[in-house]
Image: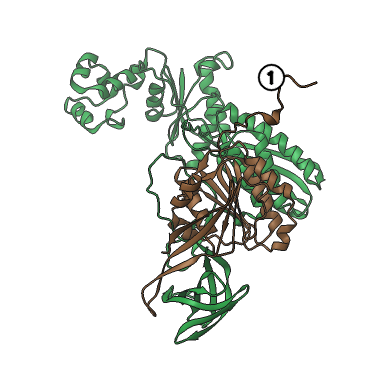
Amino acid sequence: MAAPLYLTTAAALPHHQPPLPTLPTGIAPLDALLGGLPRGALSELSGPCGSGRTTLLHSLLAQATRQGELVALVDPFHAFDPLSAARAGVQLDRLLWIRTQADLPAAFKAADLVVHAGGFGIVCLDLSGAPPKLLQHVPLSYWFRFQRAVHRTPAMFLVVTELAQASLASTCWLEFEWATPIWSGTRPFRLLQAMRFQTTLKKPGSPRTLCWEAQVE
Amino acid sequence: MYACLHRSGSGPEEQQRLVELAYAFAPVVEIVDPETVVFPITGLRRLIGEPPQIAAEIARRGSERGIHAQLAIARTPDTAILAAKHLPGVTLIPPGREVEVLESIPIERISLPPKLLEVLQSWGIHTIGEFAALPLAGLAERLGPAAVELYLQVHGRLHRPLRVQRPEPEYVEEQDLEEPLHTLEPLLFLLGQMLQQLCSRLCANFLAAGQVGLELQLERGLTYHRTIELAMPQAESKPLLKLLQLALETHPPSAPIRKVRLWLRPVQPRTVQEGLFYPPAPEPQKLQLTLARLAKLVGSEQVGSPELLNTHRPDAFRLRPFAPPRFSPSQLPASPVAAALRRFRPPLPARVSCQEGRPHHVAARRITGMVLEAAGPWRSSGDWWAETRWARDEWDVALTSGGTYRIYQELASKQWFVDGVYD
């Protein structure tokens, strides 16, 4: 017997999900495309070392700390440069920097502790430089745990990697290509003036590529 | 009625004994100056008797403690102070007969404003008796409030509450153990009970703990000290117990425990009213626990906020404890997007071949390539007056393998390093 017309299945219901609030990145082309990175979600920045992920991360940290938010960076390989961050506008006294001396399990535990403490605008786990073989052993459930911890909160969980690891759990995935330096002057009096970065938005939506620049001081 | 004890030339120890003697008779004591204390004795009438008996009892207990002080009992505190300071021995002033007792005291021995004293002496007033005979209204008109106050004092009519200074209570719990403790669990049970006692006492006085101290007497004559500074004052025992547990797990005692001493430093609780539209921040208690857990996980020296040092030395910073400032809404200008340097710590030793004085090929761990373009050298040096002097030539190089790096050559050792990558 056919179902009455006024009855329908849940899957057939129109899916009204309010858009996630975002944090502007401070990089005009990215903000024009995305409106910022989503809060209450896990985002991943992947690409080779030297492709612009850290520049984007510093810009995000600067945006958040300028608004008075506290941010946390779990840095297992001790690669964070406070001077670069300060030049990008990061208020260092609002940044909790956790170094784990290349201990990846401790880095994951530290990120878990911070993200569950709540109240941080950005929690970033910087896994750039970690051996890919080790990262392959990270269970997918870890990423989903982080994603659930920030779900429906104003916090953002960021993962910085060389090869995408958390794309299944991420709401936003940005892939970076090798950066191109921009030089000024003639040889031998050359000066590194800026870096041109190429970023592909892999998630959400269909892939879109854009270029942006950052000044070298 | 009030009693006043005065002993001229008292040192800190004698003052402490004087205060202790006063507290033996009254719950509240005003310490007038290092040599004088005054306290109420009204409640002692039923316990000891009339003022002469009370005076005798105070004198007896004072002599037992080796205190030889001048004692006065009067209707008001200021009259008692006046008598105790200027009349020897024990002085009892019956109500209404203050002037009779005090009249012989020379007026210049009383601490009065110099101008008032000068006027009184020019009038031929030299004793309290002569002063007390003046009319109050005339004194008020001609000499003002200081003279009126003195007049009321010598007539025993200046009633005021005592300016009580309570001694700072100590929040300390101690316990001697019959059997030495070998494990953490029973110690935590004991600490939990002690903390509950201390925190309830703190709460009763509207205070919170700013610091927790633990002292353990161990076997073989060893002692164990641990002090925890609290970024946010707390008066709840559970978070404090958790902090102690984390500290004990990170730095366990080296021998079984024989005696436990726990103390809290009392501070005013911090009350903060956040704005409705202020950004969210972690709850202070939760943040403190999280920081303690992180310190236990990776070491306290690996957690904190970076602070740039005022030097030209590359990569100069220190990590200080994470204590974010309160948010103040202000419009800070946005900084331009600056390329970030991702550092290699320690810097990667490299083999660099040069042509015409410029880097031509770079080889380091995981980084190898021909130099496509190079900018430099940027020479910097510093601390030439110290052992830690440094001097180096920096280059920005783009490699054929991809990536733009900052490399440098130490001028002293001629050794090349890769400092970081523009990422």
Note the chain letter of the brown one.
A
Subunit ID for the residue under disc 1: A
User: In the rendered structure, which amino acid carries the disc numbered 1?
Assistant: Tyr
Farthest residue, direction left: B122
> Picture coordinates of residue A167 (x, y %)?
65, 51
Choose between A149 and B290: the one closer to the eye: A149
Note the chain letter of the green one.
B
Residue B193: quadrant of the picture: top right
> Picture coordinates of residue A147 (x, y %)?
65, 43
User: Does dot 1 land on a helix, a strand or a loop?
Assistant: loop
Residue labelled with disc 1: A6
Choose between B371 and B189: the one closer to the eye: B371
Q: Residues within 10 Å of mark 1 (few under 14, many from 20)?
A: few
Residue B121: quadrant of the picture: top left
Left-right relation of A18 to B117 = right
Q: How many marks?
A: 1
> Picture coordinates of residue A193 (x, y %)?
40, 67
Confirm whether residue A78 shows in the render: yes
